[in-house]
Amino acid sequence: MNRILLEVIGISYSNSQNGAYTLLVGEHGAKKFLPIVIGEAEAQSIVIILENIDHPRPMTYDLMRDITEHYSIKVKEVVISKFKNGLFYSELHCEHDGKVTIFDARPSDAIALALHHKCPIYTYSNVIDEAGINANDIHFESDCDNDNHDEERSSVSIEELELMLRDAIDNEDYSTAAELRDIIKERKKTNQI
């Protein structure tokens, strides 16, 4: 079986399952992606990593990284190993004292750890063939509310935006926090010009 190196393409809210998100992973420049349904908490954890959001307290993945580093356990790679009965299965390959151990893991947890440890994520060509979706079939929902939020936020001061950002982080609403952080950065850059 051919192994394929994957990257995280994005995360979107899943209209088909209440409270769920779809994590898209695929080969760089590929025409097919794996749509992995994950929960809100897992989606927020991955967004925190992807967006480099600082959190005042360590998250579960921070704790796992700290433990593995302390005990000299290297997370070598993640493999999305199979697709069966509508579910993806993955493996976490770890090395300690020259011995590799493979752990069964949910794809969302394994991918979050891979992002934290900056290790590669793989799958097999048969998994892509069986469960992959075409890039043309991917439609990220655009929220009309986002336009209203953007208009509301444009009239708010940077100081108020920073308070909203802190509140979003405290409430673990990391997608809003990422949006606010970007607005603040853009606003500060514009004010310097």
Image (spheres, grey):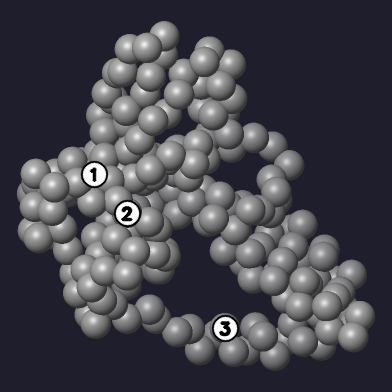
On screen, residue 85 above or below 32: above
> Of helix, strand and loop, which one carries label 2?
strand
Mark 2 or mark 1: which comes first in sequence?
2
**Proximity of marks 2 and 1: CB atoms separated by less than 8 Å:** yes
Q: In this rendered view, identify the residue nearer to me: 26 or 112.
A: 26
Of circles 3 and 1, which is in front? 1
Could you classify mark 1 by the number of other residues whose Cα lies within 10 Å: few (under 14), some (14-19), or many (20 or more)? many
Left or right: 15 as drawn, with respect to 81: right
Question: Residue 147: which numbered mark, if any?
Answer: none
Q: Which residue is mark 2?
A: 6
Q: Which residue is mark 3?
A: 146
On screen, residue 93 above or below 36: above
Q: Position of residue 74 (x, y in %)?
A: 45, 24
Of circles 3 and 2, which is in front? 2
Give the Cα distance between marks 3 and 1: 33 Å
Q: Which residue is mark 1?
A: 80
Q: Residue at x 77, y 57 (%)?
A: 166
Q: Position of residue 139 (x, y in %)?
A: 32, 81
Q: Position of residue 172 (x, y in %)?
A: 61, 52
Q: Position of residue 8 (x, y in %)?
A: 40, 58
> Of helix, strand and loop, which one carries label 3?
helix
> Of helix, strand and loop, which one carries label 1?
strand
